[in-house]
Image (cartoon, grey):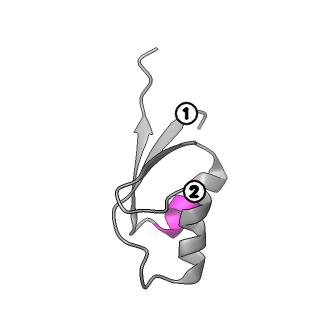
Amino acid sequence: MAGLLKITLIKSMIGRPEKHRRVLCGMGLTKTNKTVELKDTPSIRGMIDKVSYLVKAEEKIDAA
């Protein structure tokens, strides 16, 4: 778990619980279809699990 995760917001956060909106903002996801790259850590994995119905997460594969 030392790589990067590519996380995309695929559904709107309108009408979602406040805690879920805070998790998304904490990850830097503010608009639909926005993608961010974050370190693969247990805390980020927990955030993804909390809002898994709103995001798409992929492991970024490095060519190096």
Residue that label 2 marks: 27
Membership of 23 in magenta stretch: no
**Residue 63 marker:** none
Q: Nearer the viewer, residue 30 or 41?
A: 30
Q: Position of residue 19 (x, y in %)?
A: 60, 78
Residue that label 1 marks: 3
Q: Earlier in the sequence, mark 1 or mark 2?
A: 1
Q: Residue 13, relative to residue 1: is it above or below? A: below
The residue shown at (40%, 53%) is: 34
- First to last magenta residue range: 45-51
Q: Is disc 1 placed on a helix, strand or loop?
A: loop
Callout 2: 10 Å neighbours few (<14), some, many (20+)?
A: some
Q: Is disc 2 placed on a helix, strand or loop?
A: helix
Q: Residue 26, relative to residue 20: is it above or below? A: above
Q: Position of residue 63 (x, y in %)?
A: 41, 18
Q: Which image quadrant is residue 55 in?
A: bottom left
Membership of 49 in magenta stretch: yes
Callout 1: 10 Å neighbours few (<14), some, many (20+)?
A: few
Left or right? Give the position of 36 relative to 25: left
The residue shown at (43%, 39%) is: 59
Q: Nearer the viewer, mark 1 or mark 2?
A: 2
Q: Position of residue 27 (x, y in %)?
A: 57, 56
Q: Residue 46, relative to residue 50: is it above or below? A: above
Q: Nearer the viewer, residue 49 or 20?
A: 20
Kindly give the residue lying farthest to the front in the view shown: 31
Split into 4 quadrants, where in the image is the N terminus? top right
Q: Which image quadrant is residue 43 in?
A: bottom right
Residue type beneath disc 2: Met
Residue type beneath disc 1: Gly
The residue shown at (37%, 72%) is: 12
Q: Residue 3, relative to residue 13: is it above or below? A: above
